[in-house]
Amino acid sequence: MDGIGWFTYETLRRICKQHPEHEFIFIFDRPWHPDFIFAENITPVVIGPPSRHPFLWFIWFEYSIPRILKKYRADLFLSPDGYLSLRSRCPSIPVIHDINFFHRPKDLPLLSRWYYNFFFPRYAKKATRIGTVSGFSKNDIAASYHISPEKIDVMHNGANELYKPIDTVSQKRCRDLISGGKPYFIFIGTLHPRKNLANLLRAFELFSNASAKDYKLVIVGARFFLTEELDRVYQAMKYKSDVIFSGRLGPEELVDALAAAEALTFVPYFEGFGIPIIEAMNCDVPVIASNVTSLPEVAGDAAIYVNPADVEDIAAAMKRVVFEPGLRDELITRGRLRRDLFSWDKTAGELWKMIEKVLQIGE
């Protein structure tokens, strides 16, 4: 799952179990997996059509959703990925993680771009309250959509409990499997233009040219929308044999791959939160991060910050992690302090507080 998927899974799993006095209707657009039915107070419902296209999104949210909310006499519609129904009269909370599509519309196909930028400002205005995952996103949504900040609540993301350090023997075993035993930098996320992978490849090329060290770059994630520039840069690389595209990894595989890395290189142009940063800190792995959007808010003093548009700046940060005495240990120590600020328990608690505000329960 991506960040929105983990937010949904981790918060609703906790909320449903912690509040057996309430009934939860989980609405799916296809047959559900039993792993998502966390407790006896959950009623799963499938409604059509399967929504994997903007036209189908419109039908699902404007026609199917209002019918099901009315049928079950819902007190509240919670949308963990931000979509709402403009036709429903039910009180609503969308969790709008970020509005990257407002600032970087050309990263998306034309129809998806139009849908997001037409409907999401309207969703924000219709919402009873809005949730988001960073102070940056809160201020951005308020300013861009002309919404009062008082209407928006922040609930920072957490990281799965699986993410923890591994011993040196396990690190060696993992490196043998992933990179032929070589140390490596790692990126985790979708292969999407705003993730800035083209500049990360260019920076790795500079690092490899300037360094006598034999390092790899491991890229974990699936292709998503437009990646022509990434393909072009990769094909032109001198050191492209040192770049490893692993595709998606399961949670256990991903934990080991991250915990055995030299550093996380996470340099997107735009990010609403950046869960891999917290995952890396939980694994005692240093972080190289962009100095823009939400990332300084998340990483605090526990990262090396770079300008995502400056390839030499990214490469210099990679060199610092490898060559600067004591820096890796210092970043790990700071990360151990920083990571304690974030947990899915806290996220779920903040989300439930917002639900209580809307329904005026628990007072």
Image (tube, rainbow, N blue to C red):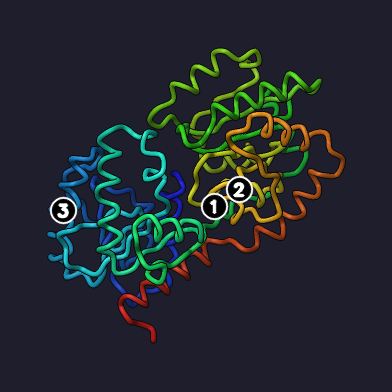
Mark 3 element type: helix
Q: Is residue 197 above or below residue 33?
A: above
Q: Quadrant of the N terminus?
A: top left
Q: Is residue 301 left or right of residue 58?
A: right
Q: Earlier in the sequence, mark 2 or mark 3?
A: 3
Q: Amino acid at mark 3?
A: Glu
Q: Position of residue 65 (x, y in %)?
A: 18, 56
Residue under the image location 12 percent in, 53 percent down:
63
Residue under the image location 39 percent in, 34 percent down:
107
When asked about the image quadrant of residue 363, the answer is bottom left
Q: CA distance from mark 1 to mark 2?
A: 11 Å
Total marks shown come to: 3
Residue in front for this viewpoint, 271 or 24: 271
Residue 174 appears in the figure: no
Q: Which residue is mark 2?
A: 277
Q: Which residue is mark 3?
A: 62
Q: Nearer the viewer, mark 1 or mark 2?
A: 1
Residue in front for this viewpoint, 300 or 104: 104
Q: Amino acid at mark 1?
A: Ser
Residue in front for this viewpoint, 6 or 318: 318
Q: Is residue 340 above or below residue 229?
A: below
Mark 1 element type: loop
Q: Position of residue 200 (x, y in %)?
A: 60, 29
Quick one: label 2, few (<14), some, or many (20+) residues within 10 Å? many
Q: Mark 3–mark 1 contact, CB under 8 Å?
A: no
Mark 2 element type: helix
Disc number placed over residue 294 in the picture, else none: 1
